[in-house]
Image (cartoon, helix red, strand yellow):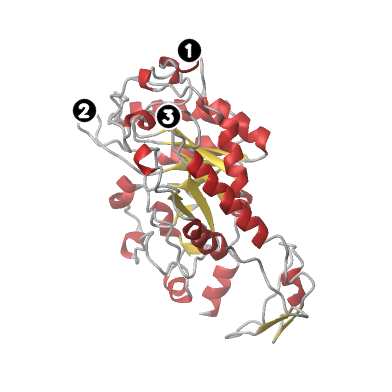
Amino acid sequence: MQNRIEYAARIQPTQRQLAVQDMEFYAFIHFTVNTFTDMEWGTGKEDPALFNPTELDADQWVEACVSAGMRGLILTCKHHDGFCLWPSRYTEHSVKSSPWRGGEGDVVREVAEACRRGGIKFGIYVSPWDRHEPTYGDSPRYNQFFLNQLRELLTGYGELFCVWFDGACGEGPNGKRQKYDWEAYYALIRELQPGAAISVCGPDIRWCGNEAGHCRESEWSVVPASLRENEAIQEKSQKTDDREFARHYSSSEEDLGSRSVILSERELVWYPAEVNTSIRPGWFYHASEDDKVRPLAELLHIYYGSVGGNATFLLNIPPDPRGLIHENDRQRLRELGEVLRATFKTNLAAQAHIAASETMPGSDAANMLDGDKDTYWCPEEGTEYAVIEVDLGSEQESYRAG
């Protein structure tokens, strides 16, 4: 047992994983032709002429994110409908065929540049499922098409902090289900954007298992290695190694890293969780949801459960057909940021005295309060439990919303 615990304790994150975990809170922006058709999933048959956000202001998007305390933004550059928010050389189904900016616009570029101006990081979502592309379902041809588009996004828009995939997969025009070449996608990202985390359907950041903002009571970063394959949907039944005989953990299970899990799994990895949900019921903008923006108390509950519980928080904010974040969403984001800044403005334990019932030589209980990620405290090996006492010196009161 002790050897297994030591093995788990020695597993370390990569720098790209740490960089995302340090960000804590960042935005998803769902925006495409769906915004103009009032749909969640497009068919791929939409006329690009529908896309015409006459007031699009990427700086306003970034300002809304910053007001909430977010440190990054992930843009849906291509959703399942296949419409590209950049002028891809490999399809006409993109902004270059729309009336927006006279067919000369590039949403991805405008958002990437706005993020740099606003001091936050930029990431991309690109859907492998493409309901418009005629080669989809012809696996080798479509995989090359997708790699070509991925290369455009990886090389044309500066440094990316994240490439976010989901595993949605359907049949192509030929009636065959597309088989994604995940390893080729990952290799291209590592070559062209080595600092970018590959999230959800990828090896760096995992999906928490729901889109409702539900957080586990204990969210572990060290989990069974098999979880890395969960969201590659069409791959689940194709594993032939001996892991198929091991216990399978779904992404939605409540216990993914306790000692009972650690002791039962041969291979463990650092694979931290991301909690993703939308500020509205839908992922894309719908006017009927203008009065259904999540209450402040609900957003705070999700924030404390995710960021406070060892996960990151990815909150979706859908721009409206004008190309702006709606006033109701902006107001809620400002309120959220005001509460978070007031709550964490003062570290009540900064001058506290801390003591531990026992300490391993080379560590110190005071390290828990020094703000240095490279120092630590830990108890003696084999300890069942330890007691930590923090003396604030006097009665303290933190900020309370409302």
Secondary structure under the numbered disc 3 in the rendered image: loop
Dots 1 and 2: beta carbons under 8 Å?
A: no
The picture places residue 22, in percent across and down from the top left corner, at: 63, 54
Q: Earlier in the sequence, mark 2 or mark 3?
A: 2
* Horizontal relation, residue 259 to residue 6: left or right: left
Direction from residue 378 to residue 27 in the image, left or right: left
Q: Confirm whether residue 17 shows in the render.
A: no
* Residue 321 numbered mark, or none: 3
Tell me the CA gap for discs 3 and 1: 17 Å
48 on left or right of 366:
left
Crowd around label 3: few <14 · some 14–19 · many ≥20 (10 Å): many
**Amino acid under disc 2:** Asn
Q: x, y percentage for residue 5? A: 54, 74
Depth check, front residue: 286 or 386: 286
Residue drawn where x is 37% and y is 65% of the image = 253
Q: Are marks 2 and 3 in contact (CB under 8 Å)?
A: no
Disc 1 crowd rating (10 Å Cα; few below 14, some 14-19, many 20+) is few
Instruction: Give the amino acid type for the residue marked by disc 1 in the picture.
Output: Gly
At horizontal 67% and vertical 59% (from top left) the residue drawn is: 342
Say which element carries label 1: helix
Q: Is 358 placed above or below 49 here?
A: below
Which residue: 59% across, 37% down? 62
* Residue at (21, 28) in percent of width and height: 174
User: What residue does disc 2 label?
Assistant: 174
Determine which residue is flagged by label 1.
Answer: 102
Q: Amino acid at mark 3?
A: Pro
